[in-house]
Amino acid sequence: MPISEITEKLLAAKKDKGITFEELEKTIGRDETWIASVIYRQASADMDEATKLVTALGLPESTAEELTIPPLKGSLEPQIPTDPLIYRFYEIMQVYGMPIKAVVHEKFGDGIMSAIDFSVEVEKVPDPKGDRVQIIMCGKFLPYKKW
Amino acid sequence: MPISEITEKLLAAKKDKGITFEELEKTIGRDETWIASVIYRQASADMDEATKLVTALGLPESTAEELTIPPLKGSLEPQIPTDPLIYRFYEIMQVYGMPIKAVVHEKFGDGIMSAIDFSVEVEKVPDPKGDRVQIIMCGKFLPYKKW
Amino acid sequence: MPISEITEKLLAAKKDKGITFEELEKTIGRDETWIASVIYRQASADMDEATKLVTALGLPESTAEELTIPPLKGSLEPQIPTDPLIYRFYEIMQVYGMPIKAVVHEKFGDGIMSAIDFSVEVEKVPDPKGDRVQIIMCGKFLPYKKW
Amino acid sequence: MPISEITEKLLAAKKDKGITFEELEKTIGRDETWIASVIYRQASADMDEATKLVTALGLPESTAEELTIPPLKGSLEPQIPTDPLIYRFYEIMQVYGMPIKAVVHEKFGDGIMSAIDFSVEVEKVPDPKGDRVQIIMCGKFLPYKKW
Amino acid sequence: MPISEITEKLLAAKKDKGITFEELEKTIGRDETWIASVIYRQASADMDEATKLVTALGLPESTAEELTIPPLKGSLEPQIPTDPLIYRFYEIMQVYGMPIKAVVHEKFGDGIMSAIDFSVEVEKVPDPKGDRVQIIMCGKFLPYKKW
Amino acid sequence: MPISEITEKLLAAKKDKGITFEELEKTIGRDETWIASVIYRQASADMDEATKLVTALGLPESTAEELTIPPLKGSLEPQIPTDPLIYRFYEIMQVYGMPIKAVVHEKFGDGIMSAIDFSVEVEKVPDPKGDRVQIIMCGKFLPYKKW
Amino acid sequence: MPISEITEKLLAAKKDKGITFEELEKTIGRDETWIASVIYRQASADMDEATKLVTALGLPESTAEELTIPPLKGSLEPQIPTDPLIYRFYEIMQVYGMPIKAVVHEKFGDGIMSAIDFSVEVEKVPDPKGDRVQIIMCGKFLPYKKW
Amino acid sequence: MPISEITEKLLAAKKDKGITFEELEKTIGRDETWIASVIYRQASADMDEATKLVTALGLPESTAEELTIPPLKGSLEPQIPTDPLIYRFYEIMQVYGMPIKAVVHEKFGDGIMSAIDFSVEVEKVPDPKGDRVQIIMCGKFLPYKKW
Amino acid sequence: MPISEITEKLLAAKKDKGITFEELEKTIGRDETWIASVIYRQASADMDEATKLVTALGLPESTAEELTIPPLKGSLEPQIPTDPLIYRFYEIMQVYGMPIKAVVHEKFGDGIMSAIDFSVEVEKVPDPKGDRVQIIMCGKFLPYKKW
Amino acid sequence: MPISEITEKLLAAKKDKGITFEELEKTIGRDETWIASVIYRQASADMDEATKLVTALGLPESTAEELTIPPLKGSLEPQIPTDPLIYRFYEIMQVYGMPIKAVVHEKFGDGIMSAIDFSVEVEKVPDPKGDRVQIIMCGKFLPYKKW
């Protein structure tokens, strides 16, 4: 996956400063996964959020503007990703895609969960048998329009 | 997508009976999405669960056994699914895969969220601006073993 | 492309009756392209619309119910379609995708045109140098949510 | 997607000058989406249009000539694009391709909508429930020749 | 490649009757390659042509109508065809595509050769060193429209 | 498509000199499409032809030798090309491949049209309704050997 | 791989009769690999050869004609075959393709080894360390034509 | 196809020296195709062979060591190669793969021809009707082990 | 995945009889994974082994012969399998392929582990923290032949 | 396959020092295949292991930190690898994947062998008929969770 230059610069600064995503969440007032999305150029910030972010990372304010431009999103390579952590989401779609579709249609009718009016959060759920990763996705239900 | 015969039989019976996944959840004592996974032959039930399910759908008990065999899972066609509802999960992986990976590694170290010791629930979140679909995934964190 | 049985039945009835999509538009009170989408099982009708449609085609009312179930959408085969008429839409996306993206972002900011809260109409524009096909797509702009 | 050098130069100049596509439309006398297509090297301008464009962007006239050469068009990567805004056009083709084909054939007979003798415009339709993106495609109908 | 039922019926009748494409050309008054295209359901005939064709093949007139419906075209499988005769056209595109593009643009400017307002003929050119296959393609030049 | 350095150098020289392919045809005594193939490194010239070509373009004679080496041919990217002009040849193969195969086999028996002992010419056919592009392919018929 | 009906019939007859390819080679006077190619419908026989073949296998003469029709060749599935014996030929092309190309060009100039005016034989070479499979391919060198 | 640096250096030296593969065969005592495989980094030489090779090409002995390291083999791009000479081997596998498999199994039982304990030679067979390329592959038969 | 008829018959018989692979191992004197490979038609048995197998499963002896024919092997669909258990082997190859290659080459020189002169065993390793699956692959090292 | 810079640096140092993976195993107290995985950036070490490794290779301690960051794993190119040694693992999955699945499910029930809580070792098994490569994979069995 070709990581953009700005992403590399931000990640390097984050590492040098020793700041975590959780600390950035407090400074900027946005969820840490969303902030990570901005850093990976999958989401765009407004000028104020971008300035707070680059300042927190000790970078010049001029770095901020690039983070406000709508990026060309996606493009993991190869298309079925090989990284085991990311692949598991592909597997979940393959295995649970149809069951989820059935339940959503039963609860909401014909339509989809928006991936745009959408948020995703990652949380650590302590568990004596081994901690668990919890991913909460929440997207607006969009019913199909008729015309 | 080639839906297996048993799935078609179960879905037809469910429709004839007019039973919802939510009602099945109460009868069987398992989450509705998991039950949908059993019906779509993406998960295997034990004999007791399978019998409860086919009975609730008004099918003969002999139908139950097939639901206890570990299925060949996955295989949406085409591999990048075209159904808009299911595709959104692919899009989420493309857009938010790397940010999620970064946050998980920061919180847990090197490893993955299991898609096997894993559950997924679908909930309706009422919202005056339009109801929302909430998907909660919860999987055990598996750290990479060293040897 | 595997056309479903119900689609074949509806198309055959439409041909036998000699009814056009335009006439169906008048009978049902919905746009002809949307009606074609219902017939091809890419959109779902409500019970009333479905009944009007099958009645207009001279089919028994019992045929109507299947048209109300949310279908598994898409799945042209092969994924880059070979039919020249349909391929042109792929070509338009390849050639004009980036320019459209640039103009949309300039006009609206970061977000997308919904393909769900969306309509598409096909019109004939008479022209002495050769009639023209006009396709009007209209989808709600969905700005990316921040969280 | 590998953006050509000339495209990057033009976009940078456009941003520095703070000129919108809409303003370029007025200066050059061509639709803004077509101008964006020239900038992304998906369309070729004549010498006069190209000179007006580079001048408006404050670039030397010598930059103009490259914009008059027929470009190698298309080539989004990967072939099924991952950017959500662009992907929606792929989804529209998957979901509505067959219905559109049926309506076009009924209205015009066997043939296609040209993607060459073709224009595409992007408009903002204000709407209290959320503004809408309107895309108007208009291409000459080309009937299949017999010989 | 899945050949449609009607194609199989026509080819079988043609073989039983021992009629060549060349003889059909004389009977119907259309080029033999176009007639082969109708038989393979890649082109649509009008009612008169279709009737002449099925009559020449000794089939009932009722067979004619299906040949007048615009077909879903293309779809060789696999997408890069393995049949050596057909593959050579792929190879020609791979090897000579760019040179042809350069020559066409120099002669005509930016645009394409239409594959719709288009004919293709196959001829045998006797040659003492081995007969040659001549393929003559002729399509209208379509210049890109500006708007 | 990655164009080789030598191709870029030759095309730049051709443009600076303002020479057309047609003029090169006269100077070198070979068809212009073949010359374009040499320039795009899809065909190899002999030393004499190569020297004439580079001299005509005002390049040093030392440039000639590279054009005599058998090149690695083909490799449009992506494999199903997105450039509309080149794609049309793919479409022609998809739509007319089977009909052409049928006619060739009827005229010649089992075998293929060679793409090696082969020529292709591009001609402009003036037409009041719009000029036409004529492509004449001529390849030796190669019957399958038996052994 | 979808094996055609005629192939299955011939293979079944061959097995019932207990005849080897080598014995067929003697009866028909053609190499056993070529005969296997006819049986798999990758090569076409003339009427005489076909009759000898079906007679040797104890099938009615009427079976012979189908073997004289030029078949649609190739189409192993998937395109990179998974059968280990057949895959090795893919591997050989991957590993030794470029070296073979270099040696052929040095010996013959620019051109190819024909796969049409071509034979392939399979022989057993006894060897105390383990018998060896010898495959001898022999194809006419076809130099690129200039025009 | 990305040719490694060392390959380019060796090919350039070979061309400057004007040495053929055949002459290298005599100097090194290995078949010319194998030597070409070493040069293209598809095979690894021992130190003695590598030194002889680089010396014969007039390169410093220090160049030799790299040729002794087991290379990452294969990787023609695209996976179904477009170069006509190399593609023919793919075509041969597609067309004759199943017949060869049938003959090998009949002669040897279940197993494969090794592509590792394997040699391939390229020879020129003079023929008045046009010289022929002969490729002789010889690999150990490996029967499937049972356990 | 298209499972052959004979496989389905054998699996059904095995289930009816309630015999495990482990019991078949004892009856037939071959490893249970190899026996499973015969049942799935990925390996071929000799007549004696096949007869023992079908007899143990209570099937007629005539069923045995088919198991002695070298099968067309492989062909999971899709090519990158979606079943989570099988996919893990793909993931292991992706993640550990290069490291294993490095270690094998260091220990053995240039060559491969045979997948033909090869065995694979599956064992259960009890572990208080959760039982483990042990897969032992053992294949002959095949050094590259030089010639 | 794009090998990362740090991998190249480590491999070069290892070669200069003439250290084997086996010696690194003794120095670091981890299995050699795991160490190779760290060097290829497919596994992450802790600071102590990383420091031992770079010191053993004679590199500055500052090189160690990069080896502790969770890498983006996998991504052999092309996705079905062409290197014969690595491909054999793909072939094993294709041929033995289903049989292994059947045996694992019989021994353990529905679930998978973890590729994360997992180890893989490579051993040389001396054998007079040719040494053998033994690969021992051992992963925790993960039963599917129900919820």
Image: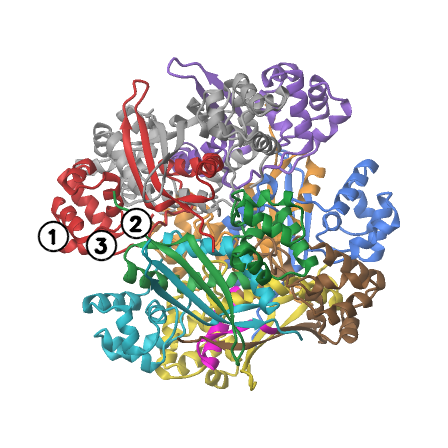
Chain colours: A brown, B yellow, C cyan, D green, E red, H purple, I orange, J blue
Residue H33: x %, y % from top left: 57, 23
Q: Is residue E8 above or below residue E108?
A: below
Q: How many marks?
A: 3
How far apart are the alpha carbons under marks 3 and 2? 13 Å
Q: Which mark is residue D144?
A: 2
Picture residue at 67% right of the left edge, 27% below the top: H45
Q: Is residue J30 above or below residue H80?
A: below
- Residue E113 seen in this snapshot: yes
Residue J83: x %, y % from top left: 60, 40
Q: Quadrant of residue A73?
A: bottom right
Q: Are marks 1 and 3 on the same chain?
A: yes
Q: Quadrant of residue J126?
A: top right
Horizontal side, residue H64 vs residue E80: left or right? right
Q: Quadrant of residue I126?
A: bottom right
State which region is magenta.
A94-118
Horizontal side, residue E123 vs residue J5: left or right? left
Q: Are marks 3 and 2 on the same chain?
A: no
Nearest to the observer: residue C75 or residue J123: C75
Chain of the residue displaying label 3: E
- Numbered disc in front, either 3 or 2: 2
Residue flagged by tag 1: what amino acid is it?
Pro
Find numbered disc 1 in the image and state the secondary structure of the residue it sits on.
Answer: loop
At label 3, counting other C-alpha atoms closer than 10 Å, the crowd grade (few under 14, some 14-19, many 20 or more) is many
Residue placed under numbered mark 3 in the picture: E68
Residue flagged by tag 3: what amino acid is it?
Thr
A97 falls in the magenta region: yes
At label 1, counting other C-alpha atoms closer than 10 Å, the crowd grade (few under 14, some 14-19, many 20 or more) is few
Picture residue at 33% right of the left edge, 71% below the top: C35
Q: Which mark is residue E60?
A: 1
Chain of the residue displaying label 2: D
- Numbered disc in front, either 2 or 1: 2
Chain of the residue displaying label 1: E
